[in-house]
Amino acid sequence: MKTPLFVLSLLVAAATTTGTAQAVQTTSLRFTGNIEGGTCHLESTDVGRTIELPQVKVSDFDSSTWAGLREFDLTANCDSDISNVTFTFSGTPDTFAPTRFANTGTARGVATVIQSRIGGAGYNFPANGNPTERSRTIPTTAGRAVIPMGAHYIKTIIGSVIKGTLITTASVTITYN
């Protein structure tokens, strides 16, 4: 019995294509990425904010060394992995009362006290203090750290307070973890 040539060529073709592979290559894949920690930023209404102290009279300093307290909050909005925010304040110390922040306005004999009011108790940040003395750390709650604050006028030298404007510039820096 003769095998038809067509069937024989099919068998030869099948035998040559089902043999062992001619070359094998194995490689590994490397996957890279970066997971960064969260961040915080001051609430937009606190950036460049002006805190307007209430108007006071020169006579308000006759029987008191300070007047015109204004309470306010500063808020940092944070990612969920941030648990604490430290607020650090800095500015120019007053010449006659270096723990107070200098007034560059036209009023004389006064400076500004900047304070935290955590739990209702005032803590005056010393303008000439070290960073620890000028800082307060606040835990975050629901992605926010809110520090209750206050600021007021303070008499700086023995003698009279002279009417005019009060202008004090201070910076706040936030660090977080």
Image (cartoon, grey):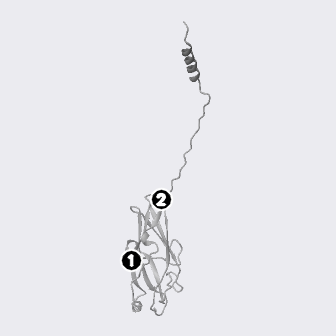
Rendered location of residue 44, percent (x, y): 43, 69
What kind of element bears circle 1? strand
Closer-to-camera residue (146/134): 146
Q: Amino acid at mark 1?
A: Glu
Residue at the far top: name it: 1
How many numbered discs, if any? 2
Q: In the structure shown, which secondary structural element does the residue marked by tag 2 occupy?
A: loop
Residue nearest the observer in this picture, 74 or 88: 74
- Residue 47: image location, x then y, percent: 46, 72
Q: Which residue is at the front of the view, 149 or 122?
A: 149
- Please report the residue visible at 59 percent of the width from the left and 24 percent of the height from the top: 20
- Position above or below: 60 against 172: below
- Which amino acid is tagged 2? Gly
Name the residue carrying label 2: 38
Give how far apart the Cα atoms at labels 1 and 2 are. Answer: 30 Å
Q: Is the C-beta separation of discs 1 and 2 under 8 Å? A: no
Q: Mark 1 = which residue?
A: 71
